[in-house]
């Protein structure tokens, strides 16, 4: 049932720069559940950065690695973990299904402006390397919004809130 799934893991989804990693760390400290960051696991398994995987093998190959990772976490019957995911994890319908099976899925969101501000602080995101990142972010955000909606059980804005407050909100709803 849904409530059993909710107690298993807390899964964070949302666009690049929405605060998944930061909130993952806060929840990890509060619950002392281990934290899994799917980008990091994929980088370790591939022995290279996400940017290098995109450059060498292409986006599709990266997406397949994401699907395989979700499937293996489910196969391992992962329990009581915080799972922070890459922003594109919701793109494949099978991933949205797998995410929901893994646990209580929280969608973190903030405005395009804030996303731009946060993502422009470092340039390790291959999808945002272009002449008009702000335009691209607005487009991608609106394209992906229904996918995050579909994949998640709870939607939380990370604008103007302390991560401590956000984590309390999640724990009350989970
Ligand atoms: C991506 C988001 C990134 C990373 C990859 C692709 C995306 O993760 O998985 O660069 O398609 O939105 P973050 O959301 O952690 O930056």
Image (cartoon, rainbow, N blue to C red):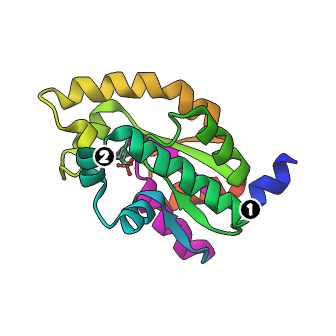
Occupied quadrant, residue 30: bottom right
In depth, the one of 47 and 164 nearer the eye is 47
- Please provide percent x and percent y for residue 42: 42, 60
In depth, the one of 9 and 55 nearer the eye is 55
Horizontal placement of 138 versus 30: left or right? left
Residue at figure coordinates x 23%, y 46% from the top left: 55
Give the magenta part as a residue range: 10-31
Element at label 2: helix
In depth, the one of 155 and 69 nearer the eye is 69
**Is residue 163 positioned above or below 115 on the image?**
below
- Please provide percent x and percent y for residue 65: 47, 51
Of callouts 2 and 1, the N-terminal one: 1
Residue at figure coordinates x 76%, y 54% from the top left: 6
Which residue is situated farthest in the front direction here?
57
**Is residue 117 positioned above or below 134 on the image?**
below
Residue at figure coordinates x 31%, y 54% from the top left: 50
**Is residue 54 positioned above or below 37 on the image?**
above
- Please provide percent x and percent y for residue 151: 62, 37
Q: What residue did someone put label 1 on?
A: 8
Q: What residue did someone put label 2 on?
A: 57
């Amino acid at each position: 049932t849904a409530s059993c799934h909710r107690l298993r893991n807390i899964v964070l989804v949302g666009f690049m720069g929405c605060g998944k990693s930061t909130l993952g760390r806060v929840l990890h400290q509060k619950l002392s559940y281990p934290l899994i960051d799917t980008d990091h696991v994929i980088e370790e398994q591939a022995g290279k950065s996400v940017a290098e995987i995109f450059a060498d093998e292409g986006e599709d190959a990266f997406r397949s690695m994401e699907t395989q990772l979700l499937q293996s976490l489910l196969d391992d019957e992962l329990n009581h973990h915080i799972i922070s995911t890459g922003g594109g994890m919701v793109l494949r319908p099978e991933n949205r299904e797998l995410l929901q099976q893994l646990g209580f899925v929280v969608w973190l969101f903030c405005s395009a402006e804030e996303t731009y501000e946060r993502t422009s602080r470092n340039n390790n995101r291959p999808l945002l390397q272009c002449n008009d990142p702000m335009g691209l972010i607005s487009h991608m955000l609106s394209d992906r919004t229904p996918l995050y909606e579909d994949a998640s059980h709870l939607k939380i804005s990370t604008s103007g809130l302390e991560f401590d407050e956000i984590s309390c909100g999640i724990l009350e709803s989970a």
